[in-house]
Image (cartoon, rainbow, N blue to C red):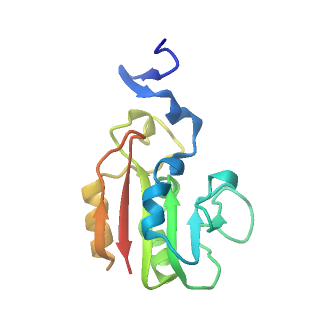
Protein backbone atom coordinates (compact mmCIF):
# COMPACT_ATOMS: atom_id res chain seq x y z
CA UNK A 1 0.00 0.00 0.00
CA UNK A 2 1.33 3.40 -0.97
CA UNK A 3 1.56 5.98 1.81
CA UNK A 4 1.40 8.98 -0.54
CA UNK A 5 -2.38 9.26 -0.01
CA UNK A 6 -2.18 8.78 3.76
CA UNK A 7 -0.01 11.70 4.85
CA UNK A 8 1.07 15.14 3.72
CA UNK A 9 4.03 17.30 4.71
CA UNK A 10 3.72 20.73 6.27
CA UNK A 11 6.77 22.55 7.65
CA UNK A 12 8.77 19.32 7.75
CA UNK A 13 6.13 17.39 9.72
CA UNK A 14 3.77 14.69 8.53
CA UNK A 15 0.01 14.86 9.05
CA UNK A 16 -2.81 12.54 7.94
CA UNK A 17 -4.52 13.60 4.71
CA UNK A 18 -8.00 13.32 6.24
CA UNK A 19 -7.32 16.61 8.04
CA UNK A 20 -7.61 18.35 4.67
CA UNK A 21 -11.15 17.05 4.04
CA UNK A 22 -12.87 18.99 6.82
CA UNK A 23 -15.70 17.68 9.00
CA UNK A 24 -13.61 17.61 12.16
CA UNK A 25 -16.70 17.03 14.29
CA UNK A 26 -17.10 13.51 12.84
CA UNK A 27 -14.09 12.47 14.93
CA UNK A 28 -15.59 13.59 18.23
CA UNK A 29 -19.35 12.99 17.82
CA UNK A 30 -19.31 9.55 19.51
CA UNK A 31 -17.87 11.15 22.66
CA UNK A 32 -20.00 14.28 22.46
CA UNK A 33 -23.18 12.20 22.28
CA UNK A 34 -22.43 11.04 25.83
CA UNK A 35 -22.61 14.64 27.10
CA UNK A 36 -24.91 16.41 24.62
CA UNK A 37 -28.46 15.22 25.14
CA UNK A 38 -31.77 17.01 24.78
CA UNK A 39 -32.26 20.26 22.89
CA UNK A 40 -29.09 21.91 21.67
CA UNK A 41 -27.17 24.11 19.31
CA UNK A 42 -24.19 23.38 17.11
CA UNK A 43 -22.41 26.72 16.84
CA UNK A 44 -20.40 26.46 13.67
CA UNK A 45 -22.58 23.66 12.34
CA UNK A 46 -22.69 23.40 8.59
CA UNK A 47 -24.97 21.22 6.44
CA UNK A 48 -23.98 17.57 6.95
CA UNK A 49 -21.31 18.64 9.41
CA UNK A 50 -23.79 19.40 12.18
CA UNK A 51 -24.02 17.59 15.51
CA UNK A 52 -26.95 15.12 15.16
CA UNK A 53 -30.27 16.51 16.40
CA UNK A 54 -28.99 20.03 17.07
CA UNK A 55 -29.89 23.34 15.49
CA UNK A 56 -27.00 24.57 13.34
CA UNK A 57 -25.78 28.12 13.94
CA UNK A 58 -23.41 28.80 11.07
CA UNK A 59 -21.01 31.70 11.65
CA UNK A 60 -20.46 32.27 7.93
CA UNK A 61 -24.04 32.49 6.64
CA UNK A 62 -25.56 35.95 6.57
CA UNK A 63 -28.72 35.25 8.57
CA UNK A 64 -30.03 36.45 11.91
CA UNK A 65 -28.07 33.90 13.99
CA UNK A 66 -24.35 33.71 14.67
CA UNK A 67 -21.97 33.10 17.56
CA UNK A 68 -22.96 36.39 19.21
CA UNK A 69 -26.68 36.30 18.36
CA UNK A 70 -28.52 33.13 19.36
CA UNK A 71 -32.23 32.31 19.58
CA UNK A 72 -33.69 33.60 22.84
CA UNK A 73 -33.95 30.19 24.48
CA UNK A 74 -32.15 28.04 27.02
CA UNK A 75 -30.57 24.82 25.79
CA UNK A 76 -29.48 21.52 27.29
CA UNK A 77 -26.19 21.73 25.42
CA UNK A 78 -24.09 23.80 23.08
CA UNK A 79 -21.70 21.89 20.86
CA UNK A 80 -19.05 23.68 18.82
CA UNK A 81 -16.36 22.14 16.64
CA UNK A 82 -13.46 24.12 15.18
CA UNK A 83 -15.28 27.46 15.52
CA UNK A 84 -13.99 29.30 18.60
CA UNK A 85 -10.61 30.01 16.99
CA UNK A 86 -12.39 32.05 14.28
CA UNK A 87 -14.15 34.43 16.69
CA UNK A 88 -12.69 37.84 17.52
CA UNK A 89 -14.00 37.81 21.10
CA UNK A 90 -13.97 34.16 22.07
CA UNK A 91 -14.20 34.88 25.81
CA UNK A 92 -17.27 37.07 25.24
CA UNK A 93 -18.75 34.35 23.04
CA UNK A 94 -18.28 31.73 25.75
CA UNK A 95 -19.91 33.98 28.34
CA UNK A 96 -22.81 34.58 25.96
CA UNK A 97 -23.17 30.88 25.16
CA UNK A 98 -23.25 30.11 28.89
CA UNK A 99 -26.24 32.47 29.25
CA UNK A 100 -28.08 30.28 26.72
CA UNK A 101 -27.52 27.05 28.65
CA UNK A 102 -30.00 25.72 31.17
CA UNK A 103 -28.68 25.15 34.67
CA UNK A 104 -26.83 21.84 34.39
CA UNK A 105 -26.41 22.33 30.63
CA UNK A 106 -23.28 21.19 28.81
CA UNK A 107 -20.79 23.18 26.78
CA UNK A 108 -18.83 20.85 24.50
CA UNK A 109 -15.96 22.33 22.49
CA UNK A 110 -13.76 20.59 19.95
CA UNK A 111 -10.75 22.75 19.15
CA UNK A 112 -7.67 22.57 16.94
CA UNK A 113 -4.52 21.81 18.91
CA UNK A 114 -1.48 24.08 18.41
CA UNK A 115 0.64 21.01 17.60
CA UNK A 116 -0.86 21.24 14.09
CA UNK A 117 1.32 24.01 12.69
CA UNK A 118 -0.97 24.72 9.74
CA UNK A 119 -3.76 25.74 12.15
CA UNK A 120 -1.72 28.37 13.99
CA UNK A 121 -2.92 31.93 13.29
CA UNK A 122 0.39 32.92 11.67
CA UNK A 123 -0.05 30.11 9.13
CA UNK A 124 -3.82 30.09 8.70
CA UNK A 125 -5.23 33.61 8.72
CA UNK A 126 -8.78 32.31 9.18
CA UNK A 127 -7.73 31.32 12.70
CA UNK A 128 -7.47 34.24 15.06
CA UNK A 129 -6.42 32.24 18.14
CA UNK A 130 -4.86 28.97 19.19
CA UNK A 131 -5.61 27.18 22.44
CA UNK A 132 -3.90 24.66 24.67
CA UNK A 133 -6.08 22.25 26.67
CA UNK A 134 -4.81 23.44 30.08
CA UNK A 135 -5.46 27.09 29.20
CA UNK A 136 -9.02 26.31 28.09
CA UNK A 137 -9.55 24.32 31.28
CA UNK A 138 -8.54 27.35 33.33
CA UNK A 139 -10.71 29.67 31.22
CA UNK A 140 -13.86 27.55 31.60
CA UNK A 141 -13.24 27.31 35.34
CA UNK A 142 -12.80 31.10 35.52
CA UNK A 143 -16.08 31.55 33.64
CA UNK A 144 -17.88 29.50 36.27
CA UNK A 145 -18.28 26.16 34.48
CA UNK A 146 -18.06 23.09 36.71
CA UNK A 147 -16.92 19.51 36.12
CA UNK A 148 -14.56 20.74 33.42
CA UNK A 149 -13.02 17.79 31.57
CA UNK A 150 -10.59 17.93 28.70
CA UNK A 151 -8.58 15.66 26.46
CA UNK A 152 -5.14 16.02 25.01
CA UNK A 153 -4.38 16.10 21.29
CA UNK A 154 -6.03 13.35 19.27
CA UNK A 155 -5.30 12.03 15.78
CA UNK A 156 -7.26 14.89 14.23
CA UNK A 157 -4.75 17.22 15.93
CA UNK A 158 -7.61 18.53 18.07
CA UNK A 159 -8.83 18.30 21.64
CA UNK A 160 -12.17 18.41 23.39
CA UNK A 161 -13.23 20.26 26.52
CA UNK A 162 -16.51 19.98 28.37
CA UNK A 163 -17.99 22.20 31.06
CA UNK A 164 -21.29 22.17 32.93
CA UNK A 165 -23.19 25.37 33.74
Q: Report whether 160 appears left or right of 61.
A: left
Q: Report whether 31 appears left or right of 148.
A: right
Residues 114 and 157: in front is 157
Residues 117 and 29: in front is 29
- Please say if 113 is above or below 96: above
- Please say if 145 is above or below 3: below
Residue located at (25% from left, 66% from top): 138
Residue located at (58% from left, 70% from top): 41
Residue located at (49% from left, 38% from top): 124
Count numbered badges in the picture: 0
Q: Report whether 34 appears left or right of 39.
A: left
> Residue pushed farthest bottom?
103
Measured as percent of width and height from the top left, residue 140 is found at 32, 70
Q: Report whether 80 appears left or right of 122.
A: right
Measured as percent of width and height from the top left, residue 142 is found at 28, 74
> Residue pushed farthest right?
63
Residue located at (45% from left, 34% from top): 123
Which image quadrant for residue 115?
Answer: top left
Measured as percent of width and height from the top left, residue 144 is found at 32, 80
Quarter of the image with the C terminus is bottom left
Residues 122 and 135: in front is 135
- Please say if 104 is above or below 113: below
Measured as percent of width and height from the top left, residue 30 is found at 47, 56
Amino acid sequence: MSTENLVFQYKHKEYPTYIRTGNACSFIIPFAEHFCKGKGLDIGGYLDWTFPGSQAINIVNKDKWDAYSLPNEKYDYIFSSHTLEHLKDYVGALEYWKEHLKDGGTLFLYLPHPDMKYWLPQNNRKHLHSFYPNDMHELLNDLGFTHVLFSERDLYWSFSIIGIK
